Image (cartoon, helix red, strand yellow):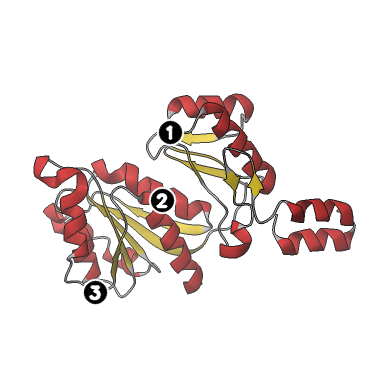
Amino acid sequence: METKEILQKVQSGELSVEEAQQLFRRQPFEEMGYAKLDTHRKIRSGFAEVIFCSGKADEHLLQIFGRLYEQDQEVFGTRATKDQYELIKSRYPMADYDPVSRIIKIEKSGKERRGRIAVCSAGTADIPVAEEAAQTAEYFGTKVERIYDVGVSGLHRLLSQLDTIQQANCIVAVAGMEGALASVLGGLVDKPVIAVPTSVGYGASMHGLSALLTMINSCANGIAVVNIDNGYGAGYMAAQINRLAV
């Protein structure tokens, strides 16, 4: 709950001064022993804390998920396994899971999504990372246009979607192999392009390193690059840019 909302509820009588005081005491973080939940993050940055699920112990994941849900009545986790989803769902049956992006979440219904970003993938094998980016941006209140399988091996596919892409406030370009999609888009739009190299490719792609180096060395302007397979980071940054635009 944001500071302004707490104060409004005290003013309206929904919360007592003592209850508000207890909520403020939980800021700027909540100590859980094995974790320190950044409950103040949404106030500082406008974006609530997200759970990176991979590698977390079951009990830790359950408790962190629950505390964040209590805080905002919604929660978002990345890189979750099917087993982790089943664990969460046993306690929070309203939780949703997407096996493609590996995102698990509880999201408020009727959430307004403003502005527009375009998430473009070079191939269908890049869609898991592209979906992580798209769903992250949507969770943070951004309208997303998905434009998939428009890699440079068939440039006419990309050009057929150019009008839609150019209307976006920001473009996320997700590509493996040689990672050329970001450079092509950078030369066609007047908006920021966030390049996401993926680990898709044959041996010499070096698990995404080849695409990463191509994107970093692009001669096109206005391109920023996130880490290999980091769809979440790209979706977050795109949501920030979109908020500035609207």
Residue 14 appears anywhere in the view: no
Real-space CA distance between mark 3 and mark 2, rounded to the nearest whole angstrom: 23 Å
Q: Label 2: which residue?
A: 232
The residue under label 1 is 55
The residue that appears at 48% across and 33% down in the rendered structure is: 56
Say above or below: 144 vs 67: below
Label 2, secondary structure: give it: helix
Q: From the viewer's perspective, is 68 left or right of 166?
A: right
Q: 67 or 195: nearer the eye?
A: 67
Foreground pick, 210 / 27: 27
Disc 3 packing (10 Å; few <14; some 14–19; many ≥20):
some
Numbered label tally = 3
Quarter where residue 40 is shown: bottom right
The N terminus lies in which quarter of the figure? Answer: bottom right
Vertical placement of residue 108 versus 224, above or below: above
Which picture quadrant has residue 68? top right
At label 1, counting other C-alpha atoms closer than 10 Å, the crowd grade (few under 14, some 14-19, many 20 or more) is: few
Mark number, residue 221: 3
Quick check: 174 above or below 75?
below
Residue 179 lies, in percent from the top left, at: 18, 55
Of discs 1 and 2, which sits in the foreground? Answer: 1
Q: Residue 35: image x %, image y %?
A: 57, 41
Residue 105, quarter of picture: top right
